[in-house]
Amino acid sequence: MNPFDLSGKKIVVTGASSGIGRQCCISCSQMNAQIILIGRDTKRLQETKSQMVNPDYHAMYSVDINDTEILEQTVNEIKDKIGSVDGIIHCAGISTTLPIKLVTNTKMEEFFKTNVFSAFHLTKLLLKPGGFNKIGGSIIFMSSVMSVVGESGKSLYSMTKGALLSGARSLAIELSRKKIRVNCISPGVVISPMSANAIYSQDPEMLERVTNMHPLGLGNVTDVANGCVYLLSDASKWVTGTNLVIDGGYVAK
Ligand SMILES: NC(=O)c1ccc[n+]([C@@H]2O[C@H](COP(=O)([O-])OP(=O)(O)OC[C@H]3O[C@@H](n4cnc5c(N)ncnc54)[C@H](OP(=O)(O)O)[C@@H]3O)[C@@H](O)[C@H]2O)c1
């Protein structure tokens, strides 16, 4: 028996149209899970679906996760059409490198809405009757090494990723009686559209400096998706309230 098998599990993945979220969909489908893909860009969601095992087995919803009404309608539709779910991987997120003098209230609101509030709002909606499987489940919030270490220009991003981490710990205690586990994954820099658009990727010297901060080099999306498979599977049934750091040694340095 494969301890990482996800047969019979229904998993909601946000950020499914790109990068880490896309790979989570692919890797979980390879482990036989049924995936509910959420993202904004319909074409890229469709591309993800076409790369998954048994594409027609999965459902996709083009949704802005900051639109609370639409998100609620989507969750109700998932409950009606697909039934209760067994897990969430919240990958949707935005990043920036911005000195504090340029961090406006509007920016803070935008970042907290997308990176933090959406995670807890989606979780709340799925915790309502009919949302989560009665036998329990697993919730994963995609945090970042920036939740536990600092870098110049990263205060805005770091505060949102730190908030996810602390929220997940308390939620893990609260939901333990329902046998719903809550964990974070904190990746270092992973090659994806997000990191390709980052300021350090525009300058070869800066990119080399960032790469050298990772003793094992930069990560791939599969490195993170494999961690998600573990945290969704019964192999991690005694793991909750933790932060799985997947960073090629960045934090250890
Ligand atoms: N890549 C890294 O080096 C790295 C390191 C540490 C942590 N992380 C975290 O890992 C997660 C995924 O990163 P990534 O590299 O895969 O980024 P990415 O390629 O830029 O993908 C981001 C995803 O978030 C979705 N998204 C953003 N805002 C949304 C909104 N308002 N509504 C719905 N979907 C929204 C995007 O959907 P659309 O494109 O459809 O709009 C996209 O699917 C993020 O939370 C990021 O902070 C990444």
Image: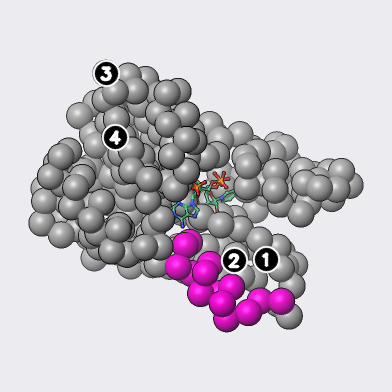
Tag 1 residue: 154
Q: Quadrant of the N terminus?
A: top left
Q: How many angstroms separate mark 2 from mark 1 (CA)? A: 6 Å
Residue 21, visible in the rendered structure: no
| Precedes in sequence: disc 3 or disc 2 | 3
| Secondary structure mostly taken by the magenta-highlighted segment of the chain | helix
Q: Tell me what residue is drawn at x 61 percent, y 70 percent.
A: 156
Q: Closer to us: mark 4 or mark 1?
A: 4
Q: Tell me what residue is drawn at x 33 percent, y 43 percent.
A: 61
Q: Percent from the top left, x then y, of residue 114?
A: 47, 62
Type of residue at label 4? Ala
Q: How many angstroms separate mark 3 from mark 2 (CA)? A: 40 Å
The numbered dot on residue 59 is 4
Instruction: Kindly indicate whether the residue at mark 4 contacts the one at mark 2 (C-beta within 8 angstroms).
Output: no
- The stretch of residues the image draws in magenta is 102-115
How packed mark 4 is, by other alpha carbons closer than 10 Å (few <14, some 14-19, many 20 or more), is some
Q: Closer to us: mark 4 or mark 3?
A: 4
Q: Tell me what residue is drawn at x 64 percent, y 71 percent.
A: 155
How packed mark 2 is, by other alpha carbons closer than 10 Å (few <14, some 14-19, many 20 or more), is many
Type of residue at label 3? Met
Q: How many angstroms separate mark 4 from mark 1 (CA)? A: 35 Å
Q: Tell me what residue is drawn at x 59 percent, y 73 percent.
A: 107
Type of residue at label 1? Lys
